[in-house]
């Protein structure tokens, strides 16, 4: 099942069933992209949606030359598991 990640200012999201969304909310503070929260509706958890959203947000930060500050628990966990991105952390 392929799910498209969309982006709007402050939000990466995946539309799930026409009305529910999985999302990663962020803000920009100077040259730092702050990962504020991630959310996946309960019935869609465990299939990699949060990871897909986070990877898209990381790619966006790299493209824009931004550092990343993971504030939400999922993002903290993601960066602990993916040490290949440690140079991006602020």
Image (cartoon, rainbow, N blue to C red):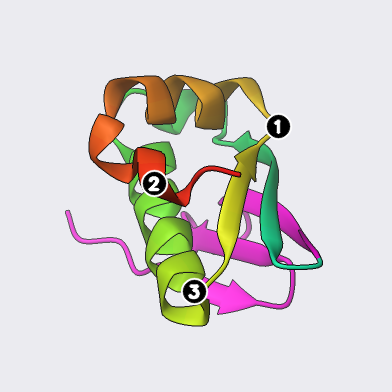
Q: Secondary structure at mark 3?
A: strand
Whether residues under marks 2 and 1 lie with C-beta atoms below 8 angstroms apart, the answer is: no
Q: Is residue 86 visible?
A: yes
Point out the tag, 3 or 2, that comes first from the N-terminus.
3
* The residue stretch that appears in magenta: 1-29
* Label 3 sits on residue: 6
**Mark 1 element type:** loop
Determine crowd level at label 2: few under 14, some 14-19, many 20+ residues with C-alpha closer than 10 A. few
The residue identified by callout 2 is: 87
Q: Is residue 45 above or below residue 52?
A: above
- Camera-nearest residue between 8 and 15: 8
First in sequence, mark 2 or 1: give its number: 1
Q: Quadrant of residue 63?
A: bottom left
Helix, strand, or loop for circle 2?
Answer: helix
Residue 34 vs 83, above or below: the answer is below
Q: Residue at x 33, y 23 (%)?
A: 46
Above/below status of 86 relative to 59: above
Residue 86 or residue 77, whichever sits in front: 86
Q: Name the disc covering residue 33, or none.
A: none
Residue 37 left/right relative to 13: right
63 relative to 18 in the view: left or right: left
Alpha carbon separation for disc pair 1 and 3: 21 Å
Q: Residues within 10 Å of mark 3 (few under 14, many from 20)?
A: few
Outermost residue, right side: 29
Q: Position of residue 29 (x, y in %)?
A: 82, 61
Q: Look at mark 1 in the image and give the residue it sits on.
A: 71
Residue found at x 57% / y 33%:
41
Residue 7 shown in magenta? yes
Residue 48 coordinates in the image, percent (x, y)? 29, 36
At horizontal 46% and vertical 71% (from top left) the residue drawn is 60
Which-is-in-front pick, marks 3 and 2?
2
């Amino acid at each position: 099942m392929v799910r498209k990640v969309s982006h709007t200012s402050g939000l990466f999201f995946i539309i799930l069933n026409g009305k529910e969304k999985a999302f990663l909310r962020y803000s920009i503070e100077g040259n730092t992209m702050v990962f504020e929260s991630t959310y996946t509706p309960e019935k869609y958890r465990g299939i990699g949606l949060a990871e897909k959203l986070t990877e898209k947000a990381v790619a966006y930060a790299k493209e824009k030359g931004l550092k990343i500050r993971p504030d939400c628990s999922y993002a903290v966990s993601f960066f602990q598991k993916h040490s290949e991105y440690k140079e991006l952390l602020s």
